[in-house]
Amino acid sequence: MEKWKCSVCGYVYDPAVGVPKDNIAHGIPFEKLPDDWVCPLCGVSKSDFEKE
Ligand SMILES: [Zn+2]
């Protein structure tokens, strides 16, 4: 699965890891995250992420 990077802070969403602190389990592709999901570090929306 593809990693997606926040263009603002550089945080990388890795589906193999998920976001444990936000209760996002591993194995969820970026595309399947809720539309209102935001960067766990800086809070921008999914549209500010780009494929790594
Ligand atoms: Zn960010």
Image: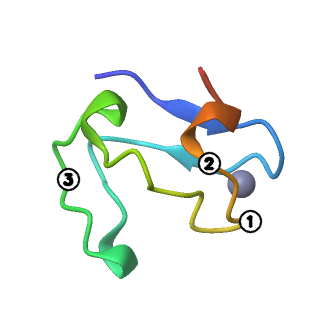
Label 3 beta carbon within 8 A of ligand 1: no
Q: Dot 3 lies on which element? A: loop
Disc 2 marks which amino acid?
Answer: Ser
Which of these two is toward me, 47 or 26?
Answer: 47
Which quarter of the figure has residue 23?
bottom left
Q: Which mark is residue 42?
A: 1
Mark in the foreground, 1 or 2? 2
Write down the residue under mark 2: 45
Quadrant for residue 12, please give it: top right
Residue at (78% x, 36% y) in the render: 7
Q: Quadrant of ligand 1?
A: bottom right
Q: CA distance from mark 3 to mark 1?
A: 21 Å
Which residue matches tag 3? 26
Mark nearer the N terminus (2 vs 3) = 3
Residue 15 placement, left or right of 25? right
Label 2 Cα neighbours within 10 Å, binned few <14 / some 14-19 / many ≥20: some
Query: Is the residue under label 3 in contact with that under label 2 (CB below 8 Å)?
Result: no
Q: Kindly give the residue lying farthest to the front in the view shown.
A: 36
Q: Percent from the top left, x then y, of residue 33?
A: 31, 45
Q: Where the N terminus falls, by quadrant?
A: top left
- Amino acid found under the numbered disc labelled 1: Cys
Q: Say whether disc 3 or disc 1 marks the residue closer to the N-terminus.
A: 3
Mark 2–mark 3 distance (CA, rounded to whole Å): 20 Å
Mark 3: which amino acid? His
As helix, strand or loop, the secondary structure at mark 2 comes to: loop
Q: Residues within 10 Å of mark 1 (few under 14, many from 20)?
A: few
Residues 25 and 47: in front is 47
Asked whether mark 1 lies closer than 8 Å to ligand 1, one says: yes
- Residue at image coords 60%, 58%: 39
Residue at left 20%, top 53%?
A: 26
Q: Residue at x 62, y 48 (%)?
A: 45
